[in-house]
Image (cartoon, grey):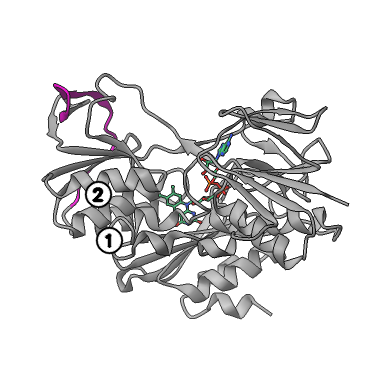
Amino acid sequence: MINKLVIVGAGHAAGQAIASLKQQRFAGQIILVGKEPHLPYQRPPLSKKFLSDEISIDRLYLKPSKFYDDPQIKKYLDTNVTAIDRNKKKLQTNDGKEIYYDKLILATGSRIRRIDISGSNLNGVHYLRNIADVIKIKSEIDSKKNVVIIGAGYIGLEVAAIIRQLGHNVTVLEKADRVMSRVVSPQISDFFEIEHVKHGVDLRLSTNIIAFNGKDTIDNIEISSGEKIPADIVIVGVGIKPNIELAADTGLKVNNGIIVNNRCQTNDSDIYAIGDCTLHPSETYNRNIRLESVHNALEQAKIAVSNICGIKKIYSQVPWFWSDQYNLKLQIAGLSEGYDRTIIKGNISDRSFACLYFKDGQLIATDAINSATEFVISKSLIKSKKILDLDKLEDKKVNLKDFFN
Ligand code: FAD
């Protein structure tokens, strides 16, 4: 009998874990401890419809607060877990609480990577990870003309699209020579670069930042060419780091993520980890991977809870992710790292097409733009690990679905 199940972190994965525990009719006490003052909420709208004010804060929460008003659930929000004593099965919090557990789920997610360049602490230089960050940005941005975004990854580009549509001057500064270079092919980068430029974004690639200039508040950014870009407000999106320190300090195995097996269990059988913070085995790619995606957070939560409740299940999912920029929906199935060939299906000029990534004849990933069918079929084909006749697939008259049976 598990009397006390404690979840550290109150993000997307934690929210799903509680929903799954209720579904499984878990009978013990559930204790949720989260550093932010909020009940579990979804982050994707933070750089999309919440930033543009198309949705209100209430729509961010995964469940209404009454869902958690249950004697079975105890919540400690605005509370940071500072240490885990695995011998005593006890957590320590920043405000002196001691919380005991029978089983523990670490759902500590990730945090933003900060930049450390002269002037990067000036007022007006922002990051975007949580509700508080967006509220702060929204409270300042109306009166600002020149917005500079650092980083042309998914989040930087989503923010650029929203802010440009709100009518501000937008400059994006990116160190690499193309956008989203870590995750998409050059064809996809080209396509998105053209779209952003068409919408009036001043996109500067291969650009390093020398300094953020201003007295107390940002005024301009000096870049590697010597030019000073006017900046009334800056939003930095240069990646994240997994929150693994709590796990590492208590001797759990970590390596760019808390290492878990395919049941989401750490090297301590009473401690599970789920979501952005995990490094987990991928059956599809035969290696350990760490993902920053809602789908992964939700599915790992379900698997951890099933196993805790005595139903043996393993995590075996093809990763997927999405990004919204202007009226483009980019849906990404799989991981393209290591591809040796790409094929484009559909017409780029129709703004509805897919870039398929192959390795040794197997489909390993797809970037589908306004092309939901290719996205859905790709997930199944990636999972199947089928070797495909790529020369046949190159034929414009042949569709991806012809390979699906
Ligand atoms: P998180 O949501 O990061 O939650 C972890 C929580 O744990 C945090 O609240 C943190 O403060 C708390 N915590 C950490 N340490 C402690 C501690 N010691 N004690 C107490 N609490 C602690 N994914 C997609 O698939 N599609 C998208 O379009 C997309 N867009 C995104 C846009 C933005 C702006 C951001 C920031 C993320 C986006 N993501 C997107 C990623 C997605 O939101 C994450 O993958 C998901 O939130 C991961 O959930 P999680 O529960 O693992 O972590």
Q: Position of residue 95 (x, y in %)?
A: 56, 29
| Amino acid type indicated by mark 1 | Asp
* Label 2: how many Cα within 10 Å (few below 14, some 14–19, many 20+): some
Q: Is residue 274 above or below residue 97?
A: below
- Quadrant of the snapshot with the C terminus: bottom right
Residue 20 part of the magenta segment: no
Q: Which residue is mark 1?
A: 53
| SS type, badge 2 | helix
Taking depth in this image into account, of 19 and 326 the one nearest to the observer is 19
Q: Quadrant of residue 333?
A: bottom right
> Magenta segment, which residues?
201-219
Q: CA distance from mark 2 to mark 1?
A: 9 Å
Q: Quadrant of residue 227?
A: top left
Q: Is residue 96 visible?
A: yes
Taking depth in this image into account, of 316 and 363 the one nearest to the observer is 316
Residue with the most extreme front position: 71
Q: Position of residue 3 (x, y in %)?
A: 82, 49
Which label number is shown at residue 138? 2
- Left or right: 350 with respect to 276? left
- Left or right: 97 with respect to 333? right
* Label 1: how many Cα within 10 Å (few below 14, some 14–19, many 20+): few
| Amino acid type indicated by mark 2 | Lys
Q: Is residue 62 above or below residue 229?
A: below
Q: Are marks 2 and 1 in contact (CB under 8 Å)?
A: yes
- Left or right: 377 with respect to 259? left
Under 8 Å from ligand 1: the CB of mark 2?
A: no
Residue 205 part of the magenta segment: yes
For marks 2 and 1 on the same chain, the one whose residue lies earlier in the sequence: 1
Q: Is residue 386 visible?
A: no
- Left or right: 48 with respect to 24? left
